[in-house]
């Protein structure tokens, strides 16, 4: 039924008797039998099928991660081969024209040439491309590259569009399944936090390692995790309720949404989720002074695209804390990772003009009208003015 609908959809695009419709139907039959959303090699099979039926030297699927296009699948793929770089101008054109087919008959001639960043890095001579649409947006870009310049019949446009539509549906289903899986995991984590009574330290009532483990799983499973987090560590011996109360009082200075965790006997971690590094530095200095100037080390935790856990930054944290202990007196020591992102300067909001204070209302000063006064024996004169000549 699905193949028949596809044939009906594309039948009017082909010339009668050319055999193009039969080739399209055969290609879609092979694609339909190659697997589905549960097949991890489904997208690779799609690219292989497309290359075989178009006679392309290479086919690629470019995913869009923010503003950076990244080639995730390609055919043919050699062992340990680096992914081929996406052509930025081609990607930009498809993003601006998602309903059209990109056609480059000759890579060295045409209106696209001035926009090629590095023509020498592109080993191909012709190209086709189209967008995998998802709702109102574009999820990925599909390209076919050819070794020689060539003209493209409409049948190849239709085949590219059909395969892109098929792949787009599969990617959409996979995204939906992934979102549901993450939602299910998030709900399970939330339930565990609510039901687990062992997530807080009994002596200080601060979150403990169990809480940190659950919180970290939720953070790394989210698409909205921060690019970097400030993490600090200090050691403080607690000899009674008085010391615990002093620690809790100092921890109240940490902003809402950030964490102070008891990671072990006398060992504490401070994690700033969305606090800028400069602000976190000030808060750590304040916390350290409230705790009597304890040694303290700090670093950046970069979860990255792979979702690296907190343990990835622990060696830097240990080194910073050891350096702080070696100083006399101890100070807050930072050990930043190589290539740490520079902190963006704060955006200053334009100052609003203060409204002027209202002035008390005062009545207008009325002046007496100047009335001519008649003086016997004299002509009319103006009040307060010199007499006029007689008539």
Image (tube, helix red, strand yellow):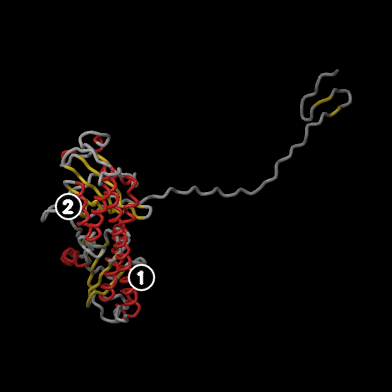
Residue 382's image quarter? top right
Q: Nearer the viewer, residue 317 or 162?
A: 162
In this picture, is 260 found above or below 391? below
Residue at horizontal 59 percent and vertical 49 percent from the top: 358
Q: Outermost residue toward the left?
A: 79
- Residue 373 horizontal side relative to residue 31, left or right: right
Residue at horizontal 86 percent and vertical 27 percent from the top: 375
The N terminus: image quadrant: bottom left
Find numbered disc 2 in the image and state the secondary structure of the residue it sits on.
strand
Front disc: 1 or 2: 2
Task: Using the rendered image of the protein, determine whether residue 204 is visible from the camera's viewpoint.
Answer: yes
Mark 1 and mark 2: Cα distance apart in space: 56 Å
- Residue 43 horizontal side relative to residue 361, left or right: left
State which tag comes first along the sequence, 1 or 2.
2
Residue at horizontal 33 percent and vertical 76 percent from the top: 193
Dot 1 corresponds to which residue?
252
Residue 63: % across, % down: 26, 53
Q: Outermost residue toward the top?
A: 391
Residue 113: % across, % down: 24, 35
The C terminus: image quadrant: top right
Q: Outermost residue toward the front?
A: 17
Badge 1, how many Cα within 10 Å: few under 14, some, many 20+? few
Q: Nearer the viewer, residue 195 or 244?
A: 195
Q: Nearer the viewer, residue 353 or 289?
A: 353
Residue 207: % across, % down: 30, 75
Find numbered disc 1 in the image and state the secondary structure of the residue it sits on.
loop
Dot 2 corresponds to which residue?
75
Task: Using the rendered image of the protein, determine whether residue 289 is visible from the camera's viewpoint.
Answer: no
């Amino acid at each position: 039924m699905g193949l028949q609908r596809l044939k009906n959809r594309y039948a009017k695009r082909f010339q009668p008797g050319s055999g193009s419709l039969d080739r399209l139907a055969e290609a879609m039959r092979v694609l339909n039998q190659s697997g589905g959303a549960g097949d991890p090699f489904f997208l690779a099979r799609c690219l292989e099928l497309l290359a075989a039926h178009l006679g392309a030297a290479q086919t690629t699927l470019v995913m869009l991660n923010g503003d950076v296009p990244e080639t995730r699948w390609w055919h043919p793929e050699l062992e340990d081969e680096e992914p081929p770089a996406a052509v930025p101008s081609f990607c930009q054109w498809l993003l601006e024209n998602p309903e059209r087919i990109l056609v480059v008959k000759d890579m060295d001639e045409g209106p696209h040439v001035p926009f090629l960043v590095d023509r020498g890095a592109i080993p191909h001579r012709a190209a086709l491309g189209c967008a995998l649409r998802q709702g109102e947006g574009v999820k990925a870009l599909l390209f076919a590259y050819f070794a020689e310049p060539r003209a493209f019949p409409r049948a190849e446009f239709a085949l590219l569009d059909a395969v892109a539509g098929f792949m787009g549906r599969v990617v959409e289903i996979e995204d939906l399944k992934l979102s549901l899986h993450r939602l299910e995991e998030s709900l399970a984590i939330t339930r565990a936090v609510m039901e687990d009574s062992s997530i807080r330290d009994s002596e200080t009532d601060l979150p403990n390692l169990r809480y940190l483990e659950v919180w970290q799983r939720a953070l790394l499973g989210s698409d909205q995790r921060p690019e970097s987090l400030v993490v600090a560590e200090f050691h403080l011996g607690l000899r009674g309720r008085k010391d615990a109360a002093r620690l809790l009082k100092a921890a109240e200075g940490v902003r809402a949404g950030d964490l102070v965790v008891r990671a072990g006997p006398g060992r504490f971690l401070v994690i700033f989720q969305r606090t800028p590094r400069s602000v976190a530095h000030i808060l750590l200095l304040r916390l350290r002074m409230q705790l009597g100037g304890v040694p303290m080390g700090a670093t950046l935790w970069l979860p990255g695209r792979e979702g690296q856990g907190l343990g990835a930054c622990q060696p830097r944290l240990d080194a910073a804390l050891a350096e702080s202990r070696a100083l006399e007196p101890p100070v807050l020591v930072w050990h930043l990772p190589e290539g740490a992102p520079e902190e963006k300067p704060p955006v200053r909001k334009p100052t609003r003009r203060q409204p002027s204070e209202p002035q008390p209302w005062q009545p207008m000063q009325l002046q007496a009208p100047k009335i001519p006064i008649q003086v016997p024996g004299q002509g009319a004169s103006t009040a307060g003015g010199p007499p006029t000549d007689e008539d």
